[in-house]
Amino acid sequence: MQTALDASSRRRVWMTVAVVVLLVLAVWFSTRIPKTIAVFLIAAFVASAVHPIVNWLESRRIPRIWAIAVVYAGLIIATIVLLVVIVPMTVDQIQALIVNVPSYLKALQSWLVQTQLGLRAHFPEANIPSQLIDVQQIGGQRLTEILTLTVTSLGTLALNLATGLFIGFSALILSFFFLLNHQQLAEGFAGFFPPSKRDTARKLSTEAVGVFGGYIAGQVIVSGITGALIAGLTAVVGFKFALLIGIISAIGYSIPIIGMLIAQLFALALSAPQGPFMVIWVQIVMFVMARISDNILVPKIMGGSVGVSPIAVMFAVFAGGELFGLPGLILGIPAAAIAKLVWRYFLGPWMHGQIDAVDESQPQLPMMDDPLVTEPIVIEISP
């Protein structure tokens, strides 16, 4: 019996070592083909994001192939609108922002002077430097350096843009085939597991794709609506950079906890030259829209939460941002939800099984209702 247990233990150790070696080799190989890996990751991301919409259309008795075609037609139309309308308008506002940088710096210099005079009036005993930093000169020099660097690197920028468009187009085509063959992909994933665990693997893959895709699709829709409404409401009162702040707000809202705070700081800087009224109006619009999105749009569009506690959300966001930058900030929450699913389906049951096995191997104390246990002897002591 002991020999059989030792052989089983050795077999498990060797299997674990083999799995670790294969994972290391896979990571090493993936670092040698980064563009190919990027295409497949983006394709999987897009396929997961549109998967809930395809399922919803399919539930309305639309054949799957036509549901996929409708979704991708919408993606193509949205991309064309983005490239033809949104991008040129955004470029125009960025150019206007660059042109207005000197006036921005002049206003900042004026604020510094007023702040210095106010501090001297209220705190005459404080040692405040008489000379202020020449913000205009430093800002102008820095802007010149940035423009010079941009002009000299136009060739590299064009090449990177072409590479990015090729990767994006290839990933879009590949994601179409991912959706079309989702059942085969699920079976292929389950095939990596022993026969006794394949049903669990299928449930895990289905639920993971649902959680990840539902979160991403809902986040894109909610962020887009939030950014569009902020851009529209701020444009009504004549904010010069309404579209730009709408795009920043859409990106910021997709980053939990800190995203909208950073977007409001950008809005504060962009709206300051137009006066206090514009600053207050833009800040109110962004704050109110964020609360409306949190309390109305998110429950209606995204449904329930991903099932991750607030502490886990904060850890996932900050850890993801520290490890992977902006993608980690955005994808930290669904990654934490998928990790929770893996724990629930595999790691948790395995750990409980190990603990139960250890408990069963320990000698058990006899129970009082055991027939082998004699009744306790009671000794009475008379006073």
Image (tube, helix red, strand yellow):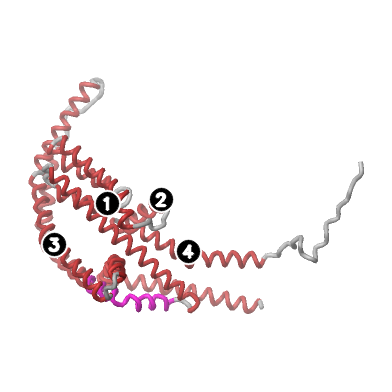
Query: Which of the 4 image quarters holds residue 308?
Result: bottom left
Q: Which amino acid, by three-letter code, is at mark 2? A: Pro
Kindly report the distance in space between the C-alpha atoms of the residues bearing marks 2 and 3: 37 Å
Give the secondary structure at mark 1: helix
Q: Is residue 334 above or below residue 21?
A: above
The residue positioned 43% from the left and 64% from the top of the image is: 341
Query: Which of the 4 image quarters holds residue 340?
Result: bottom left
- In the rendered image, residue 62, in percent from the top left (x then y), is placed at 27, 73
- Examine the residues drawn in magenta and state their main secondary structure: helix
Sequence-first disc among 4 and 2: 2
Residue that sits furthest to the front in the current view = 61
Q: For mark 4, does the 10 Å Cα neighbourhood hold few (<14), some (14 to 19), or many (20 or more) residues?
A: few
Give the secondary structure at mark 4: helix
The answer to whether marks 2 and 1 mark residues whose Cβ atoms lie closer than 8 Å is no
Q: Is residue 316 left or right of residue 224?
A: right
Residue named by callout 3? 81
- In the rendered image, residue 246, in percent from the top left (x then y), is placed at 19, 50
Give the secondary structure at mark 3: helix
Q: Is residue 48 above or below residue 130?
A: below
Residue named by callout 2? 310
Q: Which residues are magenta?
A: 171-192
Q: Which amino acid, by three-letter code, is at mark 1? A: Tyr
Q: Does residue 166 appear in the picture of this structure? A: yes
Residue 292 is a magenta residue = no
Residue named by callout 1? 253
Q: For mark 1, does the 10 Å Cα neighbourhood hold few (<14), some (14 to 19), or many (20 or more) residues?
A: many
- In the rendered image, residue 71, in percent from the top left (x then y), is placed at 23, 69
Kindly report the distance in space between the C-alpha atoms of the residues bearing marks 2 and 1: 17 Å
For the residue pair 214 and 245, the one nearer the viewer reads as 214
Residue named by callout 4? 344
The answer to whether marks 4 and 3 mark residues whose Cβ atoms lie closer than 8 Å is no
Sequence-first disc among 1 and 3: 3
